Image (cartoon, coloured by chain):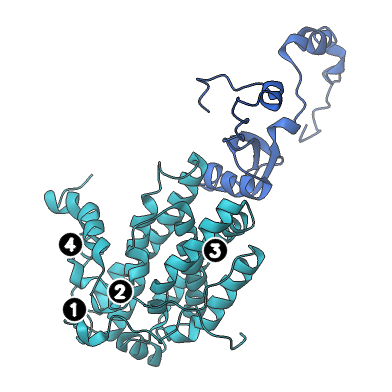
Amino acid sequence: MSGAQTPPTEQAAGTAADSPPVAPERSWPLWEVFVRGKRGLSHVHAGSLHAPDAAFALRNARDVYTRRQEGVSIWVVRADDITASSPDEKDSFFDPAADKIYRHPTFYDVPDDVEYL
Amino acid sequence: MSSDVSPVNSTNAPAESEESLPGAAENGPSGELPEAAYLLGLADDAMVYAQRLSEWMTNAPQIEEDMALGNIALDLLGQARALYPYIGSIDGTGRGEDDYAMLRDERDWRNVHLVEQERGDFADEMARLLWFSAYQVELHTALTGSSDDVVAGVAGKALKEVRYHLDHASLWVVRLGDGTEESHRRMQAALERVLPHLAELFDDDEASVTAAGLGVGVLPSSLHDAVVGRVRRVTDEATLTLPEASSWRSRGGRAGIHSRPMGYLLAEMQHIARSHPGATW
């Protein structure tokens, strides 16, 4: 996107007869890509890309993020459709867990003959 | 397939007659084994189209499409690379992949004119890719049954690749054809422009007849109906009209007679290898 010129506001474009119509969005929407590796148990965020629609987002993801056999399964989702926590909320979201160490299962004595724990 | 008028095998206007092309009657440009000549045609189609498609890097509508077309070009390059050394072993010359790709002159190339044409606009490329990948899907499906194990092996690997190429082209043709008025008009025009260069894919030249007789190759004309069927399914969905016949058709590629863009393509592709003979990196 060239951000050099400020686009006219919708209101201005709709009312002023001499102003140019709002140009259609030239850039494809952004998609987030999640790839599950061959030995991976879950999909992991791999990056993002632009695509005109979901079918192409999936194919572009294949071409951009799995060229070196990184994955066996791909998810794509519109970046706009992701609701993310805000950095401003970091303190209230995550700090209250900091002093609750009893939530970690570390207060058990594991018998010597229990394997795989 | 239904027996409607073939859009590509029309012979009603042979604008360029075989007789008018000097050297066209020769038994292949290298005069070598028909099997080798047949395989060279397949390898050269892939090599030259790989070069053309790679031109889209930095020129496609978005960087993601650069990558997609670049990947397709690399698949085709791989198909050519798998075939060249094998051709060198069966034609007795012992030539390697660089000898074929970088050190042959125009008259020794056996690719069809379709793949050497300049890339045009994006709709032109999608029209060409749709037809060529539909052709390659049918070709490699048939060649997996080749009596030659190497050919069958290359075809088996290529088939997975070209199915993806066809999918890519199909998605674009549907979106452009069934998109805006402008994209529909330009996609339709591209289908008209590519038409004269399709008939060559389905010509049964001497080398392919011999290769098919040996069970190594497949008769190009036998692929025609299925290829048209594949393309028609896409153009129907795209609300486009598959043109019925062109007033002229290209010919001569399989005999080493090429169109104007071929020389420029080879010059660009080969000049490094020829300026620095034997250079490695």
Label ID, residue B30:
1
Other-residue count near label 3 (Cα within 10 Å), few / some / many at <14 / 14–19 / ≥20:
many
Q: Depth-wise, is mark 2 or mark 3 nearer the camera?
A: 3
Q: CA distance from mark 2 to mark 3?
A: 23 Å
Residue B137 visible in image: yes
- The image quarter containing residue B79 is bottom left
Of the residues under marks 2 and 3, which one precedes in the sequence?
2
Label 1 close to label 3 by CB (< 8 Å) = no
Of the residues under marks 2 and 4, which one precedes in the sequence?
2
Label ID, residue B103:
4
Tags 1 and 4 both on a single chain? yes
Q: Residue at x 81, y 33 (%)?
A: A114
Amino acid under disc 1: Ser
Q: CA distance from mark 1 to mark 3?
A: 32 Å
Query: Does B104 appear above or below B265?
Result: below
Label 1 close to label 4 by CB (< 8 Å) = no
Q: Quickly name the residue at label 3.
A: B166
Name of the residue lying farthest toward the bottom = B213
Instruction: Provide residue A34's location: percent of width, then percent of height.
Output: 66, 39
Tags 4 and 3 both on a single chain? yes
Of the residues under marks 2 and 1, which one precedes in the sequence?
1
Amino acid under disc 2: Leu
Instruction: Using the image as rendered, state which of residue A44 and residue B229 is in the foreground.
Output: B229
- The image quarter containing residue B86 is bottom left
